Image (cartoon, rainbow, N blue to C red):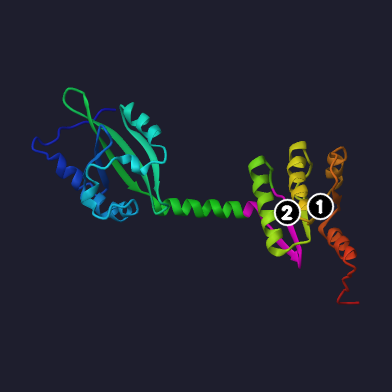
Amino acid sequence: MQAIGQLPLKLNGHSILENIQETIIVADLHYRIQWLNSTAVDTLAPLFQLYGVQDITDVIGLNMDMFHSSPHHQQKIMKSLESTHRARINIKELYVAETVIHPIYNESGEKQAYLLMLLDVTKQAKREQEKEQIIEDLSLPLLKVWDEILALPIVGKLDHSRSTKLAEKALQECVKERARYFLIDLSSLKTMDDDSGHYINIIHEALRLIGTTCLIVGISADMAQSIVNLDYQWKTFGNVRQGIAYILKEEGKTITSIND
């Protein structure tokens, strides 16, 4: 849809860009900074110092490549840019912005420069990161059952990425807690397919290599049928209690009931 209406004849483009109250940068066709509005000056001055630019006025003429980890890729995008391009940038984990880049044309339709508008989404990005961390923590729920005993309930489907994170966290926590035993609880799973079995075995074998005994607990009748043909050297138990009882027996300990 095209724009409608008519702009005032004496409308000043500089004044419009200055009063938008968003971070705006104009760069030439070689990606060198030509102009910043006052909002950009206030917002970016502390960030430019991280790149060795102490005086904000010194940024005029600097190449935008300094912000990009892959400048050649960015230049390729800009060179072929004919309309609006959107991207998210992250400057030193301190400033995150949704960037809107649009080429500026003269009356003859020739590209003359680039207009960049940076919309600050730092707080939003931080909330998204915190949310992702919470989700990841919930998906990797390691529990301390007893001294030197950790447990991991498997909830949901395992894939390569998640199983790798589970193995890394299990190893880290076992070393940190000096865990001698690690329980993998499968009670939330109804059956075991080949992929899930493979991923669990990776965790099992990784723990074995650091000297931690891994027990697979929560094996139901249906689960037993689905893993009976899997050639894994697992110690399996019907529930967590049986696993704990096995550990205590191995350690020569017993639990005495309060009522005994």
Q: Do the residues labelled 1 and 2 touch (CB within 8 Å)?
A: yes
Q: In which quarter of the image is the C terminus?
A: bottom right
Q: Quadrant of the N terminus?
A: top left
Amino acid type of the residue tagged 2 in the rendering: Pro
Using the rendered view, name the quadrant where residue 256 is placed. bottom right
Specify the segment rendered in magenta.
Answer: 138-155
Q: Circle 2 — which element?
A: strand
Return the mark for residue 218.
Answer: 1
Q: In this view, does 145 lie to the left or right of 83?
A: right
**Location of residue 57 with respect to 258 vertically, above or below:** above
Amino acid type of the residue tagged 1 in the rendering: Gly
Q: Circle 1 — which element?
A: loop
Q: How many marks?
A: 2
Q: Distance between the residues labelled 1 and 2?
A: 9 Å
Task: Indicate the position of residue 48 as horizontal and vertical percent values.
Answer: 31, 51
> Which residue: 85% across, 39% down?
231
Using the rendered view, name the quadrant where residue 118 is placed. top left
Task: Indicate the position of residue 22 as horizontal and vertical percent values.
Answer: 27, 48
Residue 120 is inside the magenta segment: no
Question: What is the crowding at mark 1: few (fewer than 14 residues within 10 Å), some, or many (at least 20)?
Answer: many
Residue at the extreme left: 10
Task: Indicate the position of residue 210 as horizontal and vertical percent values.
Answer: 75, 55
Task: Indicate the position of residue 199 as horizontal and vertical percent values.
Answer: 73, 42
> Which residue: 32% across, 28% down?
79
- Residue that numbered label 2 is attached to: 153
